[in-house]
Amino acid sequence: MLLNVGDIVRMRKPHPCGNDLWKITFVGADIKMKCEKCARVVMLERPVFEKRVKRVEQTAPGRDEGEENSGSAS
Ligand SMILES: [Zn+2]
């Protein structure tokens, strides 16, 4: 699974606050993510994260992995 900081992911189970969208804030051996609704931060080991995640909803802007993207930021 390709992940970048800033990506928005949807989890299989919603957070107790009712939200199921999280923003990735750290990618490494562990994945750190922040609840988009209540701002709670959780850290999961990558295999655990990959089991719980449903899909990437939105990729972080400014990251074009082999994709033509002419977003100029000047
Ligand atoms: Zn929450």
Image: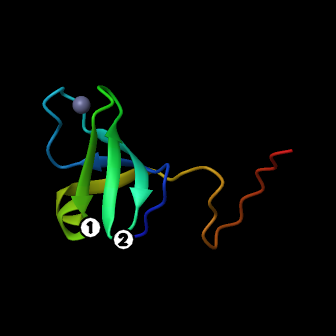
72 or 39, nearer to the observer: 39
| Viewport quadrant of the N terminus | bottom left
Q: Crowding at label 2, few (<14), some or many (≥20) Cα neighbours within 10 Å?
A: few
Left or right for 27, reference 47: right
- What residue appears at the point 72 percent right and 59 percent down from the top-left corner? 69
- What residue appears at the point 39 percent right and 67 percent down from the top-left corner? 28
Amino acid type, callout 2? Met
Left or right for 74, reference 56: right
Q: Residue 30: image x %, image y %? A: 30, 64
* Residue mark closest to the camera, 1 vs 2: 1
Which dot marks residue 33?
none
Amino acid type, callout 1? Arg
| Viewport quadrant of the C terminus | top right
Image position of 73 with respect to 16: above or below:
below
> What is the CA distance from the residue labelled 1 to the residue labelled 2?
10 Å
Left or right for 14, reference 40: left
Query: Mark 1 = which residue?
Result: 46
Image position of 67 with respect to 15: above or below:
below
- What residue appears at the point 23 percent right and 48 percent down from the top-left corner? 11
Q: Are the two marked residues, 1 and 2, in contact with CB atoms closer than 8 angstroms?
A: no
Indicate the quadrant where residue 47 lies.
bottom left
**Local secondary structure at mark 2:** loop
Mark toward the start of the polypeptide (1 vs 2):
2
**Local secondary structure at mark 1:** helix
